[in-house]
Amino acid sequence: MKKIALVPILALLLASCANDPKDTVSTVVETSSAEKYGLALVDEANPEWQYQNLRLYPVAADAATIAAQGDLTNLKTLGEAMDTRGFRILERKQFGRQEAQWYNALTVQNKSGVPVFLMSGDVVTGGNQDRVVAQDQVIAGLEVKNIDVFCVEAGRSSYYDESAPEAEKQVAAFKGYFSVASPRVRTAVQSTGSQQQVWDAVADITKANGAESSTKTYAALDRTESEQKAQRDAYLRFFDGKFADRSDVVGVVAVCGDKVIAVDIFGHPDLFKRQLPHLLHGYAADAVAQGDTPPSASAPVAQEFQRVARLAAPEAKGHDNAGKFAYEGKWVHLFKK
């Protein structure tokens, strides 16, 4: 196995398999900066990491980095928290938020005593409209906090369960976790800050995936049986458990055609593996929308990896093209915007 080290200045030349996933990848000699940041892009000719037009390049962390960030295993993901007693997301049980402001804000009540990681792109269902979380953050145990969100269901503005008791409708609780949104939707959330552009991205993805609905919800991806849904399910089956035997993988670079559609790197392998099924759901939606073009040698895999992974440096901050979320002195999530 070879690894591409993180090189802060020198651009890396990478050639991926355009038609044959067994082809190897050319790299530049690694430098000591890999030890400094503890991250490396895995360059292994492994056909198990490509299905149809989607290829995943694993990102590995060294033992020292994993050990230093061991506390992150205590974080629950939002998907886990939604099934945890004492954790709730509500629409209108707020502190000082005006009625007119419910649209782009929700209230999280975490009485579980366990910190919960909310990732930008996490989609929750229910309330008066399905929503997507706007920023990475941690809701500490026993904390109540208002959070920023965007609507991903443009055609609904009433409580999802008409038969619910009036008291439940008043607080407009969210009952379900859906997945991490597709990279295209996440880009609209993270880079534009525009509700209309988020709606446009949702419309593009649902249309391309044969999942248009009367309420225009992103969650229609799994509510509509279609040829595209069967394709997405095939991606999920193929990639299920692919990194189970690797104890050092903390993230992936996802490539479709000549585009890097996502880079997601987490502070610990445990957190990455728990979030990966939800990430794959979004990757698959983008892969179906991209068409049949196989991963190309021109995809800037190494460059995008560098751009994101260099944020692991303690002093580094996010920028227009890459984001960083840190919690209690440790970086939790590095990502492409």
Image (cartoon, rainbow, N blue to C red):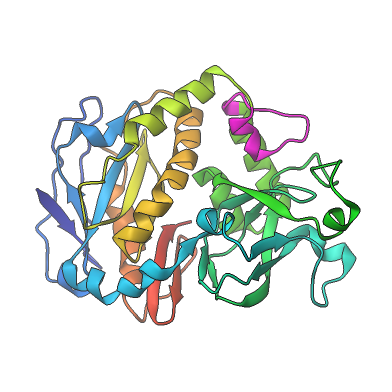
Task: Please give left or right for residue 240 compared with residue 211 in the image.
Answer: left
Whether residue 174 appears in this view of the structure is yes
Q: Is residue 212 magenta?
A: yes
Q: Measuring from the top left, give residue 270's x and y in whole percent.
A: 33, 59
Q: Residue at x 45, y 76 (%)?
A: 327
Task: Please give left or right for residue 70 compared with residue 95 in the image.
Answer: left
The residue segment tinted magenta is: 208-223
Q: Residue at x 86, y 46 (%)?
A: 158
Q: Nearer the viewer, residue 309 or 113?
A: 113
**Residue 299 falls in which quadrant of the image?**
top left
Q: Measuring from the top left, give residue 185's x and y in whole percent.
A: 58, 46
Q: Measuring from the top left, give residue 149's x and y in whole percent.
A: 67, 59
Q: Residue at x 67, y 67 (%)?
A: 108
Q: Measuring from the top left, give residue 286's x and y in whole percent.
A: 49, 36
Q: Residue at x 49, y 63 (%)?
A: 320
**Residue 209 falls in which quadrant of the image?**
top right
Q: Is residue 137 magenta?
A: no
Residue 275, placed above or below residue 93 = above
